[in-house]
Image (cartoon, rainbow, N blue to C red):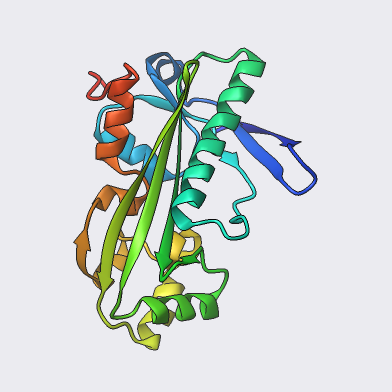
Amino acid sequence: MDSRECCSSSSSTVRILWRVAIPTTVTEANRAVICLASASPRRRELLQQIGVPHIVQPADLDERALPGEAPASYVERLARAKAEWVYADRQRRGAMNLPVLGADTTVTLEGLLLGKPADEPALIATLARLSARTHEVLSAVALVMSSGTRSVVSRTRVTFRKISEAEARRYWASGEPRDKAGGYAIQGRGAVFVEHIEGSYSGVMGLPLAETAVLLVAAGVGVWHSGA
């Protein structure tokens, strides 16, 4: 997919970079009922699953948590910020007036945010923390329209079996955990670690579908569009 890049800054400490994605076909753009403020292939697949045609314009923000920020507040703030920046940019450029959907997901254990592992030692440490324990996955969704922003946070409890260091090393070598919050993908090879899940499976993937559908229906966008 072709794209163009631009950047802006809202303060001296926050740098915003976003890529304006160009739809693959004119038909895709014409059928779109929302703009997704994320480059995540999983989120695209999940929207397609519930019949929501969309275009993509990802927004990459400084995703660091604020001092003392609670995990739920953190993911909700980022989901709203992503959607609001993309919506404002589209308004400035005179782009098609579409609602913008933003999302963010994080893994937390005992109040600590477990981000994306930077290297093999980081993944080994993360999986050692999660091994044989229950953690929480928080996924926030925000929808921005001319009437304002609405958002919701999904909470899911995930229990892992015991994970050996050798398994963690093999998992890192697969390449899968490198861009995943908490260092694993429940829809991929990381599924072998999961003993039990209580909550939203799609939320752990990155977009809680029940909550997303409620937002879309309430906004008049709806789901299950024909041909999506």
Q: Is residue 28 left or right of residue 161?
A: right
Q: Position of residue 63 (x, y in %)?
A: 59, 52
Q: Residue 186's quadrant in the figure?
A: bottom left
Where is the C terminus found, in terms of image quarters? top left
Does residue 21 appear anywhere in the picture? no
* Residue drawn at the location 38% of the way across and 38% of the way down: 44
Q: Position of residue 217 (x, y in %)?
A: 28, 23
Q: Is residue 33 left or right of residue 115?
A: left
Towards the viewer: 81 or 204: 81
Q: Is residue 163 above or below residue 90?
A: below
Q: Is residue 83 left or right of residue 205?
A: right
Q: Is residue 13 above or below residue 89?
A: below
Q: Position of residue 40 (x, y in %)?
A: 45, 45
Towards the viewer: 214 or 163: 214
* Residue drawn at the location 35% of the way across and 24% of the way down: 53
Labels in figure, total = 0
**Farthest residue in the front direction?**
68
Towards the viewer: 23 or 118: 118
* Residue drawn at the location 40% of the way across and 82% of the way down: 128
Q: Position of residue 209 (x, y in %)?
A: 27, 39
* Residue drawn at the location 43% of the way across and 34% of the way down: 142
Q: Residue 150's quadrant in the figure?
A: top left
Does residue 115 appear anywhere in the picture? yes
Q: Residue 85's quadrant in the figure?
A: top right
